[in-house]
Amino acid sequence: NAGVTQTPKFQVLKTGQSMTLQCAQDMNHEYMSWYRQDPGMGLRLIHYSVGAGITDQGEVPNGYNVSRSTTEDFPLRLLSAAPSQTSVYFCASSPSGNTYNEQFFGPGTRLTVL
Amino acid sequence: AQKVTQAQTEISVVEKEDVTLDCVYETRDTTYYLFWYKQPPSGELVFLIRRNSFDEQNEISGRYSWNFQKSTSSFNFTITASQVVDSAVYFCALSEAQGGGADGLTFGKGTHLIIQP
């Protein structure tokens, strides 16, 4: 199993550009989520999904969209990138439909918005 | 609202010293789960331990041990005989049962542990 994969690993955008961060897992996990990590801030939840077709907002959802058309994929879309979205983004999945158990994290995407 | 505080921003010790990383949490829920994750310089997040609110037994895994005390809302992590490979950022995190546990983990801001040779 590849576990949780994220692409790209690095990305530089200009303000106003849009892009999609890809996340996929091959463990048949129901629960998937996106976090952003900023220096001195820990990780903060952006969006999450408890199963295909179901998504919800986390702590910092503004400027981001998600969809969950399949169990495996959970892409994160930035509609109009802003410098404040410069961060490291982590995707995670869990076998249960919640965060009671170990979250399996992807390797992260480092995004810089100029 | 839940909250996790890791008051130690950075700790630096010499190899072979013991070191304790503090974690204090706040929650109104009686059922919750606590975690520790390690983030080495390579950047990935490595799961270390999970503890539920009904299990206050301390746990030891090799050089690692965890002390969970509900009375003080703390879940501290001790590394015995530290090694350079222990250098990393360590995160404590909380998941509440309220809401079905779907609304993610609440992370502390992390403690950067530096082990000097």
Image: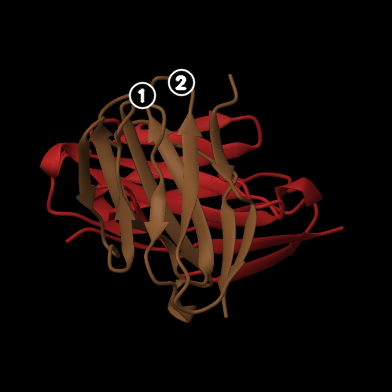
Chain colours: A brown, B red
Tell me if residue B23 can be seen: no
Is A80 positioned to the left or the right of B19 in the image?
A: left
**Which residue shows up at 62% across the image and 62% down it?**
A11
Q: Which residue is mark 2?
A: A27
Q: Earlier in the sequence, mark 2 or mark 1?
A: 2
Q: Residue furthest front?
A: A17
- State the image coordinates of residue A51 (x, y, percent, origin top left): 25, 30
**Which residue shows up at 56% across the image and 45% down it?**
B45
Is B50 positioned to the left or the right of B97 in the image?
A: right
Q: Which residue is mark 1?
A: A95
Q: Label 1 amino acid? A: Pro
- State the image coordinates of residue B62 (x, y, percent, origin top left): 64, 30
Is A61 positioned to the left or the right of A105 in the image?
A: left
Question: How far is mark 2 from mark 1, CA to CA?
Answer: 8 Å
Image disc number at residue B84 = none
Q: Label 2 amino acid? A: Met
Tags 2 and 1 both on a single chain: yes
Q: Secondary structure at mark 1?
A: loop
Tell me if residue B51 can be seen: yes
